[in-house]
Image: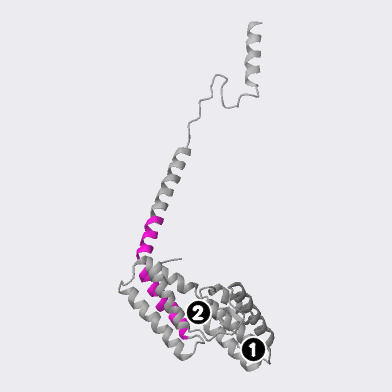
Amino acid sequence: MADQFANDSVADSSSDPALPPDRSPTEQDEPQGPGCLPGVLAATLLMGVVCFILFAVSAWLIFQKRGDLASRTLRGTVIPELEQSRLGPEEKRLVIDQLTTLAADLEAGRYENWQAGGIMQRLINSPMMRWGDLLAVAAWAEANLPEPERAEASKQISRFFRAAELDRAVARDLHDILAPVATGESTTGFVQLRSDLTVEAVAEVVKRSRLVADRAAVPDQNFPAVSLAEVVRRQIEIGGRDGAT
């Protein structure tokens, strides 16, 4: 009887579903260790510190090289684009001469980094890159629009140039004004004036010029021609004096 009871006990314990088949009923669950989580956290923290240091060093190097970067931008992008622009020959020469002199001064270290940054910010924000395109639209309107549309176009476009002269209109304003008569972006990221101007597209340019001039609180009247060379000169002067805005 005792032997039968022992055999039944062994059979019952071996068939217990709570015990895995490869473990004996006397084995105890051992506590689990922390695994690889601390190592992962430490590695992540270390990578974050390294990335922060690299970013800080890169930012410091860029800050120290702002004059050199500004000069390269002028010589490699801004001046070549202006040379291909629709500015009049004399105005184009004056502007390019100013920017060439500025590039040489930056290379010679005549401006500190904060001054170089301020000058370039003001030049980039100014509408100088597409100034000639709006002049070309004004000339087209003068030659092709009937009165009184021709007089209205001359007045509103002159009001925009006055707003730019007063630093109340910037590059993005001119970009928006010329959108109805613009092509797609070139490989350098610039847009050009379309060759097939129409009365409808030019009328939209005139309307947008009026809206920008109204926002800039420019009186609704004709203004004398504004010199882009003078606008550029002022941007260089103010940027060198006050730095970035």
Q: 144 or 22, which is in the foreground?
A: 144
- From the viewer's perspective, tell me whether residue 244 is left or right of residue 18: left
Q: Quadrant of the N terminus?
A: top right
> Is residue 183 covered in magenta?
no
> Is residue 72 covered in magenta?
yes
* Disc 2 target residue: 129
> Mark 1 is on which residue type?
Ala
Across and down, in percent, residue 67 comes to 36, 70
Taking the spot 50% from the left edge, 85% from the top edge, the residue there is 85
Outermost residue, bottom side: 143
The magenta segment is 55-83
Instruction: State how the image is colored.
Output: one colour
Across and down, in percent, residue 83 comes to 46, 85
Please determine whether, in this image, residue 66 is positioned above or below residue 160: above
* Disc 1 target residue: 151
Let me know if residue 36 appears in the view.
Answer: no
Among the two numbered marks 2 and 1 on one chain, the one whose residue lies closer to the N terminus: 2
Q: Tell me the chief SS of the magenta region.
A: helix
Q: 107 or 41, which is in the foreground?
A: 107
Q: For the residue labelled by badge 2, is the local secondary structure a helix, a strand or a loop?
A: helix
Please determine whether, in this image, residue 41 is positioned above or below residue 175: above
Q: How many marks?
A: 2
> Mark 2 is on which residue type?
Met
Let me know if residue 114 appears in the view.
Answer: yes
Asked if marks 2 and 1 touch (Cβ < 8 Å), the reply is: no
